[in-house]
Image (tube, rainbow, N blue to C red):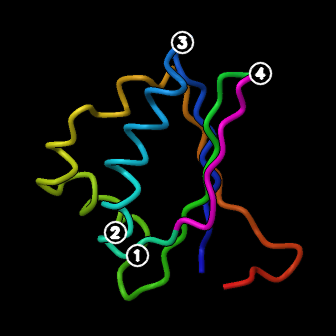
Amino acid sequence: MPIQIRIYTINRGKLQAFAEAWLQGVYPLRLKHGFAIPGAWTIEETNQFVWLIGYDGPETWEAKEEAYYHSPERMALDPDPAQYIARAEHSFVQPVVPIPY
């Protein structure tokens, strides 16, 4: 399963608001769309939100992402956690130890 790490630097003072909006909106919607989310963390010292996302299905990663972002549910998220992101980094990672799922 391809796994991507996403590191978001959040606007100052908005880390908690982002985490709450992500947990209430993005998290359940991603699961509904067939993605796996093995973990998510906040780093208060650097005002960052870090999470892992995976997908293992018949569609390509790109097609699955496009379908998610263009879904009516995603477009209707309120609050949209994206408004709090100052910088986003996305990288596919390769496991060094077995992933327990």
Q: Residue at x 54, y 12 (%)?
A: 13
Distance from the alpha carbon under mark 2 to that under mark 4: 33 Å
The mark closer to the camera, 4 or 1, is 4
Across and down, in percent, residue 91 comes to 65, 52
The mark closer to the camera, 2 or 4, is 4
Residue located beneath label 4 in the image: 45
Q: Is disc 1 surrounded by few (<14), some (14 to 19) or many (20+) residues within 10 Å?
A: few
- Please, what secondary structure does the residue beneath circle 4 have? helix
Dot placed on the residue nearer the N-terminal end, 3 or 2: 3
Q: Residue at x 64, y 43 (%)?
A: 50
- Please, what secondary structure does the residue beneath circle 1 have? loop
Q: Is disc 3 surrounded by few (<14), some (14 to 19) or many (20+) residues within 10 Å?
A: few
Residue located beneath label 1 in the image: 60
Q: Is residue 47 left or right of residue 95?
A: left
Q: Are marks 2 and 1 in contact (CB under 8 Å)?
A: yes
Nearest to the observer: residue 78 or residue 92? 78
Residue located beneath label 2 in the image: 64
Across and down, in percent, residue 94 comes to 77, 69
The mark closer to the camera, 3 or 2, is 3
The quadrant in which residue 10 appears is top right
Residue type indicated by callout 1: Thr
Across and down, in percent, residue 46 comes to 73, 22
Residue located beneath label 3 in the image: 13
In the rendered structure, which segment of residues is drawn in magenta?
37-45
Distance from the alpha carbon under mark 3 to that under mark 1: 36 Å
- Please, what secondary structure does the residue beneath circle 2 have? helix
In this view, 49 is above or below 37: above
Dot placed on the residue nearer the N-terminal end, 2 or 4: 4
